[in-house]
Amino acid sequence: MATMEVQAARQPVRRTGGRSARVRTAVIEATLAALLTRGLDDISITEIAQQAGVHPTTIYRRWGGRSNLALDAVLSGTEAEIPPPDTGSLRGDLLAVIRGIFPFLRTPLGELLVRLALRRDLPEYEAARAGYWAQRFRAGAALFERARARGELRADVDPVLALETLVGPMYVRMLMTGEPLDDALLVRCVDLVLDGIAAPPR
Amino acid sequence: MATMEVQAARQPVRRTGGRSARVRTAVIEATLAALLTRGLDDISITEIAQQAGVHPTTIYRRWGGRSNLALDAVLSGTEAEIPPPDTGSLRGDLLAVIRGIFPFLRTPLGELLVRLALRRDLPEYEAARAGYWAQRFRAGAALFERARARGELRADVDPVLALETLVGPMYVRMLMTGEPLDDALLVRCVDLVLDGIAAPPR
DNA sequence: GCGCTAACGCAAGGGTAGTAGCGATAAGTC
DNA sequence: GACTTATCGCTACTACCCTTGCGTTAGCGC
């Protein structure tokens, strides 16, 4: 009796070194350059291809389309890890959090990342985005836990909502109103979230 | 001597009624339908044209491109005026403000408006956007003035930043994190902005 | 009504995005 | 070093976006 050889769906051996790697870095580099000069919607794959010294079909095959290519390029240029702050006070930690995000968002790359996050035609981005926010909010949870232990926090505060409220104005100004945005405003954001706007009871 | 007749650059007599009006409403309607079903980036002008019973060339000539067409359609479907609230208390006014924005943003049309606001390839949109926010913040200013007179407000509160902080989490959840969003959260947003997160001094 | 011309319809055409087939090259394995 | 095949280059092709030029229709002012 012949052996029951189940032909396992053998996945092809990927080739990650040498030419493929060179092609990838060249394309990613050219894409980033194009993104930073032309914007998110006006990049041409044909143009990027000849800029990278590569044939357009290669890009279509490996990335499949503009959105995916832009996503890969921007994520490749972004380091995900941000050390969670521990300054010893709630106010100091919140300042560190918002100051850790703000300068990056001001760079062209940061702005691209935000705009990419707002697209809905990229199911691949959902995972990356979820990971990004999960990581940030894990750091936030620790931050609030310490503050609670120090007695600096109200009892009923939701850390997630608090962080969203903290960074909310930054995104609103960046994306919607276009109002000016600087470090002094970040400090005011922190103090507003800490103390609220209501007059203290007397 | 002949009269010095300066040939003033005579602008053409616009025809706003009759056929032009019919074409416009038909196209706008078809565009809105297409936007709501296909999304902001996947609309086809050819398709919209035949849906509206109009030749594609007409759309290209009158609107010039997809972005402009989408902008006009969405703005046409949106009423700009929102009555400023006056409930008698700061908390009531803030709730009214955020509750006035929230249901609209949940509609497909509201979401389209927000996404349009995030595009940078539409200089025409800048004016509309500025007007929208100016109107909203004028109402906000009156709201805070009354609260200040009632002694409900801290002395150093910036109304603009306060409003941005109020609505910030709503936009963050809608655009970035995708966290759930309901009326109960709006109430918590208001209370957080009012009271802050810091434990009261004792 | 009448004339003028803005606005529309139509046909033709350039340009670019994206796909499919096939041979050539080179990465990984032995 | 030799073999297998993943990956890339090339050509050809389709499809759609958008523009241009010209003839036709129908608002608007008189």
Image: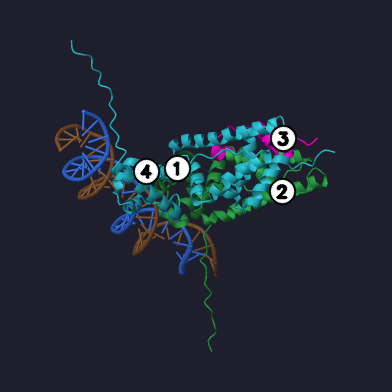
Chain colours: A green, B cyan, C brown, D blue
Q: Name the secondary structure under disc 1.
A: helix
Residue B189 position in % (x across, y down): 67, 45
**Crowd rating for badge 1 (residues with CA inside 10 Å; few <14, some 14–19, many 20+):** some
Residue with the mark numbered 4: B65
Q: Does the residue at mark 4 contact the one at mark 2 (Cβ under 8 Å)?
A: no
Q: What residue type is labelled 3?
A: Glu
Extreme residue in the right direction:
B202
Indicate which disc, 4 or 3, sits on the residue closer to the N terminus.
Answer: 4
Letter of the chain that mark 4 sits on in the rendering: B
In the rendering, at what x and y percent does residue D12 appear?
Answer: 28, 58
Tag 1 or tag 3, which sits nearer the N-term?
1
Q: Residue B75 carries which label?
A: 1
Q: According to the image, label 2 marks what residue?
A: A159
Determine if marks 4 and 2 fall on one subunit: no
Residue, disc 3? B152
Residue A59: percent from the left, percent from the top? 44, 53
Circle 4: residue type? Gly
